[in-house]
Amino acid sequence: MAVGGAGGIRPAQARPPRAAGMDRPSVTSQWGGGCQAALEAQRLISAHGALGCACEKGEPRRQMAVRSSPSPAPLGAARGDPGEAGALPGPDAGLRGARAAAPLKAKARKVRRIKALVIDLGSQYCKCGYAGEPRPTYFVSSTVGRPCAAAAQAGDTRKETYVGHELLRTGAPLKLTNPLQHGVVVDWDCVQSIWEYVFRTAMKIRPEEHAVLLSDPPLGPAGQREKYAELLFEALGVPALHVAPQPLLSIYSYGRTSGLVLESGHGVSHAVPISEGNVLPGLPGRADYAGGDLTRYLLRLLNESGHAFTDDHLHIVEHIKKQCCSAAPAPGRELGLRVDYELPDGRRLAVGPERFQCAEMLFRPSVAGSSQPGLPALAAACLQRCRDAGLGAEMAANVLLCGGCTMLGGFPARFQSELGLLWPGGGLAVAAAPERKTSVWTGGSILASLQAFQQLWVSREEFAERGGAAIHSKC
């Protein structure tokens, strides 16, 4: 859906017709806006090269051996947001219902005939699947378990880390770790464990046979892309890599190449302006709160109402948030009566004003003790910087909501209303795609499946020869 400047919520436009000459027309047409996104991305890449990034002077582009080809049969399907269907989210929701895969054969296979893997490492889930597919194949929990120090003894043969379903299959006490804090990697060993699990356990594929398109959060620390490359090339042995900014992938999932991406996931929120496929430097904004902070705030509100939840119940509170909570149309205008939520033990929990109060944190973080701006204020400040650069009207007309936190009921309309009060320039239009929770992954799937994109892979040999310069010249 889309939220119009004057007319409130309006339905999304009809899908564009399939165009001839696309790399995978039969697949991209499944995306809704994906067909248009693929056309826009292919047009932009063909006209401007690596999304506006040219190779170093005097160096011709080399065609990478990796090509699009039909993907193997999927091992399972992630059906929307893990936990939405009623079951509490587990450590590896995407593996539920997965059918067994055939054992790997020892015979080597040519890299050029196997599809690329798209990986979006988030603070809550690592989303992965083959390029050219309309949605991720698996959601693997970003939580990693390590045996407690007291349990580790001399001669202990247990694993050093546990990921996904492994967290449920060990009887040993584990210390749970999330390798990302506010979207920034703080534990690379855990990231490597997650990626090894993605390849060998979830997807059941050999990393040396699949190129990887990896998403990269905006405003990240210097050197993070090089560290990604070092881990994937040297530790896992992938043949080729492309690292793409998350906001750029999100905007492709909307079928556009220009606009203001407002992304709020589990650990961090960003407002990032993009013009003709280029992230505009110096203009993005960031707020260090998102859906995970909303869950902890809801836990606090429920306990203030007389309940006794602890951090061990965060997964239950997360599910309560998804099932019961919503943004009020305006501050102080909570709607509806209490709703009942059935706890895992069968008891019923009455959720009252808390289901609206928790969402206020996204608009007024001060209610949770934070001095950071609300999401409408974050976007308005970014629009003001864009207006100073002569791009205010273009960005205001293309505000795109992305990330799981924006899936909260009532959020798009409330965000539109509050942003309109902070942006007096007019011409404001906010779009909210139904599957915006996975917009980063979907944009990567579109991009990596395009024939025009294939020249932008960085090979393992290129990285060995040129190091980080190879990554920055093509990504």
Image: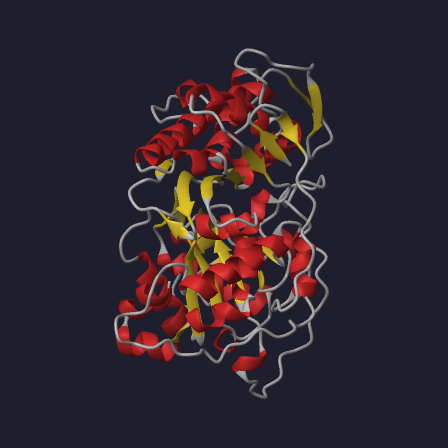
Q: Which residue is farthest top?
A: 332
Q: Taking 134 as reference, is 376 above or below it? A: above
Q: Taking 82 as reference, is 53 above or below it? A: below
Asked if residue 385 lies left or right of residue 1, the reply is left
Residue 427 at x, y = what percent?
A: 49, 29
Whether residue 338 can be seen here: yes
Q: Which residue is farthest bottom?
A: 107
Q: Taking 464 as reference, is 402 above or below it? A: above
Q: How many marks?
A: 0
Residue beneath the point at 47% across and 66% down: 46
Whether residue 158 can be seen here: no
Using the image as rendered, state which of residue 202 and residue 326 is in the foreground.
Answer: 326
Residue beneath the point at 48% across and 50% down: 257
Residue 340 at x, y = what percent?
A: 71, 23
Using the image as rendered, state which of residue 225 and residue 166 is in the foreground.
Answer: 225
Residue 289 at x, y = what percent?
A: 42, 34
Using the image as rendered, state which of residue 390 and residue 186 is in the foreground.
Answer: 390
Using the image as rendered, state which of residue 222 and residue 312 is in the foreground.
Answer: 222
| Quadrant holding the C terminus | bottom left
| Quadrant holding the N terminus | top right
Classify residue 322 by image quadrant.
top right
